[in-house]
Structures are given as structure tokens and as C-alpha cells.
Image (cartoon, rainbow, N blue to C red):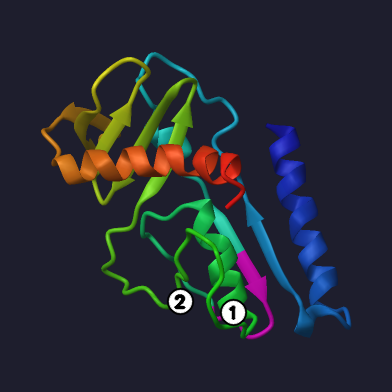
Amino acid sequence: NNTAKYADYAVGEFFKLAKQSSYWKDTLFVVVADHESRVGGASLVPVEQFRIPAIILGDGVAPKMDQRVVSQIDLAPTLLSLMGVSGSYPMLGRDLTQVDDNWPGRALMQYDKNMAYLSGDDVVILQPEREPAGYLYDFASKTLTHKSQSDEMKQMALSWALWGSLAYQQQL
């Protein structure tokens, strides 16, 4: 508990100093977690423990609380956009400054050998040697309940799960 409090204090002090520095006007800062520090339990994928905060700070970055479901893969295109870099680049993420606030979003979560694909509140969980399973995630109660998901949603989950390895193996 004290370590977390100190880290919070130290990050705050860092940004106080950064705002007074000469590089503040030309720098974007990103603070993001990977997942909760104590990911565990008997759930196929503990979705609630993958809900993490991210902060983007910089001169001219307007304060905004964003409640959409997004992934870390969205950070790079968003940061490039905030830097004024436009164009086409080989990234899977979305520029969050260019996506409607009502976009349902999507997130990818890996827990041991299981992978979950969350779009809005719909979930597909992939497990080794099993068919993809559909669920509905209730953000209020933090529970997964079985729900049939479309073949398209299952295919999307599989494509996200396989793309990284495929791209690496084929040197894409």
C-alpha cells in the first residue's frame, strides 16, 4: 500500500517538474499499466483485472475522461495523431482522436493459455483444444455469462489471437 502511494506521489512530482521544463511543450507523456498486479483466479479470463488506467499528458492535450473499451494497441496511432503525424502506418490500433465516442471498442486479453476478445460487452474466449465460447460481460457486476456469439465475432477473436505470430513468422 505504501509503495503504491509513494509511486503516485513520485509520478505527480515528476509531472510538476516536467511542466516547468523547456521540453514540456514538445513532449507527450504516456503512463499505462499492463494489467492489475494480482491477476489470478479460476475465471477463464478475469476481464475485470484487465481494466486498466492510461494517462496521456502534454501541452495542448485537452483533459478528457474516456470510458470506451480500448487496448494498448490504440496508444501508438493515437499518440502519432496527437503529435500531428498523419498517414498510413502498419499498426493494428485505432486513433482514438478519430473514433466516435459511441464506438463500442474492443480489447484483447491473454490469461495463461486463454485469450479473450471483448467488443462492447460481447466476449469470445479462445482456449486450447476447444471451440471458441461466447459470453456477455456485465461491467457493473464484473461477471461473464454464456451468450451465443456470431461466427464473425469468433473469427475476429481468432484473427486477433493469431495475427502477431503469423506476421512475425512471415516477416510482415
Percent from the top left, x then y, of residue 56?
61, 67
Residue behind mark 1: 82
Nearest the viewer among 124 and 7 is: 124
Residue 6 is left or right of residue 92, and the answer is right
Camera sees residue 78: yes
Camera sees residue 140: no
Check residue 100 for magenta coloring: no
Query: What residue lies at 31% left-to-right and 74% top-to-bottom?
Result: 100
Compared with 136, 24 (above or below) is below
Nearest the viewer among 81 and 170 is: 170
Helix, strand or loop at disc 2? loop
Query: What residue lies at 77% left-to-right and 82% top-to-bottom?
Result: 26
Mark 1 touches mark 2? (CB < 8 Å): yes
The part of the image, by quadrant, that contains residue 168 is top right
Q: Which mark is residue 97?
A: 2
- Give the crowd class for mark 2: few <14, some 14-19, many >=20 residues within 10 Å: few
Q: Which residues are magenta?
A: 56-62
Check residue 61 for magenta coloring: yes
